[in-house]
Amino acid sequence: MMDADPDTDRFEEMPDHLQSGLTQNPLEKIWVPWMSSRLSRRRGSSVPQFTNSPTMIVMVGLPARGKTYISKKLTRYLNWIGVPTKVFNVGQYRREACQSYKNFEFFRPDNEEAMKIRKACALSALKDVSIYFSQDHGQVAVFDATNTTCERREVILFFAKENGYKVFFVESICDDPEIIAENIKQVKLSSPDYLNCDKEEAVADFLKRIECYKVTYIPLDDDKDRNLSYIKIFNVGSRYLVNRVQDHIQSRIVYYLMNIHVTPRTIYLCRHGESELNLVGRIGGDSGLSPRGNKFAAALGKYIRSQCIPDLRIWTSHMKRTIQTAEAVGVTYEQWKALNEIDAGVCEEMTYEEIQENFPEEFALRDQDKYRYRYPKGESYEDLVQRLEPVIMELERQENVLVVCHQAVMRCLLAYFLDKSAGELPYLKCPLHTVLKLTPVAYGCKVESVFLNVEAVNTHRDRPVCDEPQCSQTPPLRHSRAQPMASPAPTKAPCLEDLGLTELSLENVSVDRDAEDALVTVPDHI
Amino acid sequence: MSAADGSMDPCGPTPSRELTQNPLKKIWMPCKNGLPEKHISQRRVCMTNCPTLIVTVGLPARGKTYISKKLTRYLNWIGVPTKEFNVGQYRRECVKIYKSFEFFRPDNEEGLKIRKECASAALNDVRQYLTEEGGQVAVFDATNTTRERRETINRFAEQNGFKVFFVESVCEDPDVIAENIVQVKLGSPDYTHCNTEQAVEDFMKRIKCYENSYQPLDEVLDRDLSFIKIIDVGRRYLVNRVQDHIQSRIVYYLMNIHITPRSIYLCRHGESDLNVKGRIGGDSGLTFRGKEFAHYLGQFIHAQGISDLKVWTSQMKRTIQTAEALGVPYEQWKALNEIDAGVCEELMYEEIQQRYPLEFALRDQDKYRYRYPKGESYEDLVQRLEPVIMELERQENVLVICHQAVMRCLLAYFLDKSAEELPYLKCPLHTVLKLTPVAYGCKVESIYLNVDAVNTHRERPENVNVHRSAADALQTVPAHL
């Protein structure tokens, strides 16, 4: 796809790359320079480099201060926005090294043999961190351990410096006995360490374990550690001390940590009631509710009232069908443009059959990589995630919220709460007339699915089945085309993977497939 | 009907109200007999339930006014009506001529009286702004260095139902303070009649007057207050009790800004094929002149000798083609894409007038809020661009190659232009705007790279009535092929 330009003669002194023009990657619709030779390098990065070097987030704090809670939540958030992140929990390494846990005596500061084991575990975890960064394309590693001594933190800093990793400490300080007791109850009693204990024994032992650490605990110091990058979280977020934020990703991490809370609450996710376009199997558009959709809206109102939720916020998109649905609940609601359904561009208001007829190649590409696929003049799921990030941030700040949205949007939000990968996200089941009730519990989220007993069409289209094992594999990397940050180093010439294309020879997702194969999973409609 | 406080009618469901789509913003709202009904649904995130009073704290020359003005500019740009109230200004109006630092001596009873009155007058204006003039945030810019003064402000806020958020700037670096004095104090009305040395000496003595009675916000004593303490121009922050969304956004913003000198270059893509045809939107490539511009842009950038320049483009062909000519790495941002003209994409203004005369008129009536059918408004653009602005604040030297509407939004942020002015800012093709922060604002240099291009700027016509003639509507359309 060369740019025809009869006038380039006048600029023979112009370099090659200008004369050769651009080509648009068929999957994500990203413009890349047309390579006349594989040797020339691509300058434009559409893969954001959030940071130039890998980052280690190092937790600091006594046991039961929420380090693992923060580690897991932060990891979930970073992965969702497209930053490959992994948690390395040293406690897990310890459990693997010492098959069975006896009691707190293991953690006594004078227990030399245990000290040796614990240090070995930490080093083993660090080694895995470097493998994650160098071989597995990780960008952030969360090193989840107490790291309560200067000596241990020195070891980590030295390791990071040697390898060219940035370090950001997250320290959690809490002296509220109620919070600590609640933590122990929520996550320690069910730990593998205490499988065979009764509750009282477990609590008593754990408290003694904490005492073992207190003896040698040296918190990050305002003066001595003034050159380190860190955030100190006091009493679950009532106060923060932030020191030397180095780059964009650290700034985003700080913002996220300052917005999350642990107050119990419930998030309700649902789609608008069945719409007129849903009934006829058309995607997108801005139609109103069908009669059954209206019935659902009424049922939703009844359900919400029966839940007796204090101070419930209701959010909708700017599209008629979600607003009509919220109207039936009879409570103030807020409209967010960011919650609008994915923009299907040239395919707006088409049926799948029409898309197959008019854009068979596009239809196939979408099945090959539904997460990254961008509709011509439209959006991709990847774009949606970027668009929804402020919604997630505000959901974290809020307490009880009902979000009335759309299929693709709901899939993205659900993937965030349930830690679903980019491969799974576009195929999550979010049927009409079903409310998902999410309640944070321990390190994750409890989901209750409530069908409000009003029939509706099925709008879920599965990936057309294929016997080849490769076809269910999406590229393991999940790069979000989100805000690019630091300037990227010029990358190698793009290969198929870079362009987001996988094997083209798979039958039912091949661009050469039959219309019948393409439409095999289209749900019924009028 | 449901109560405004969100409590629900236990008697049963309210019948769904009919919806109508507001023709300007394309927002769906409940209506009765085809007319929009007054209702409580909000169109965007509710930033805060009650007005917020931001109170600066700190010795003179610690950047309080710099922060106040910058924060005010940011909040207004994202759509939160904000105004700053600088007590020093009230003092200057009260005491016509500034003699010397003696006015600020802690034992100068008359001085103290006047200063206290000025603070009260300012608070009065704050109250009026927040309760009667539709303001949402007021920035109370003064030293506020004593606990007693801050208590007064807290009581005032409580009486009026305002939330309070303190922003304290603590800095002991003599170089930073000296630079502040040079940048903003020497040019102050207080020192117009002094030479540099006199002014600096007097100002240093002025600072001394405050030092003895300065009670910084304290982690323990002030643990129930909401505040951010900025230490050494952002090396460290202490954040206490953030109450709501707007405070959280303010903290995030304050933690991302810096004062390292740098330049931001804004320009549009080179002239495109659709530009010369007088068509809006689309995703066309550069014309021959557009490519020429790209070439000269490359030369210009190299000549500027900028260390570590980041180059950003949108994901549209024309900005990327332009960046390619520079021969340096660049990053593509979808957020920098041109405003989506929806059904009007790739049309000429003449065609829009022909097919959608009502839309065309509505756009001229309120260009900032007008949303194209199935498209976007400038208001939407600003929301989309907020992460770009946040990252621009974090970065140092950046060249942003973007589009007309996008560039107008970014420029409005840097030059503090209102929503009314924004959509009519002049951003011609083939012209680079170099923005350099200076004192409390931004210096702009406009550099035309001497390659001709069509004019794409359409002024607001005189007649914006929906029944106007086509000739009236098309009066200001620029020439094209």
Image (spheres, coloured by chain):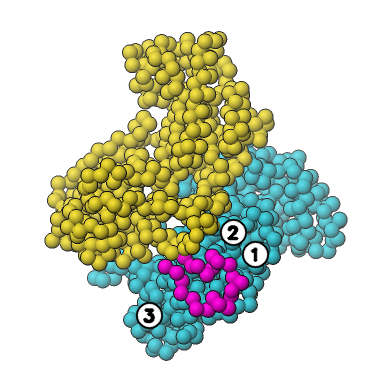
Chain colours: A yellow, B cyan
- In the rendered structure, the answer to whether residue A121 lies left or right of residue A243 reads left
Residue at the spot of label 1:
B301
Please report contact status of discs 3 and 2: CB closer than 8 Å, yes or no. no
Q: Give the structural element (helix, strand or loop) at label 2.
A: loop
Name the residue at 54% across, 38% down.
A55
Q: Name the residue located 76 percent from the left edge and 52 percent from the top edge.
A: B179
Q: x, y (%) of residue A250? A: 54, 42
Residue denoted by label 2: B328
Task: Give the secondary structure at mark 3.
Answer: helix
Which corner quadrant of the image does residue B106 belong to?
Answer: top right
Residue A5 drawn in magenta: yes
Residue depicted at 67% across the width and 46% down the height: B233
Q: Callout 2 environment at 10 Å: few (<14), some (14 to 19), or many (20+)?
A: some
In three-dimensional space, the C-alpha distance between marks 2 and 1, rounded to whole angstroms, equals 10 Å
Is residue A266 found inside the magenta-colored segment of the image? Answer: no
Extent of the magenta region: A1-22
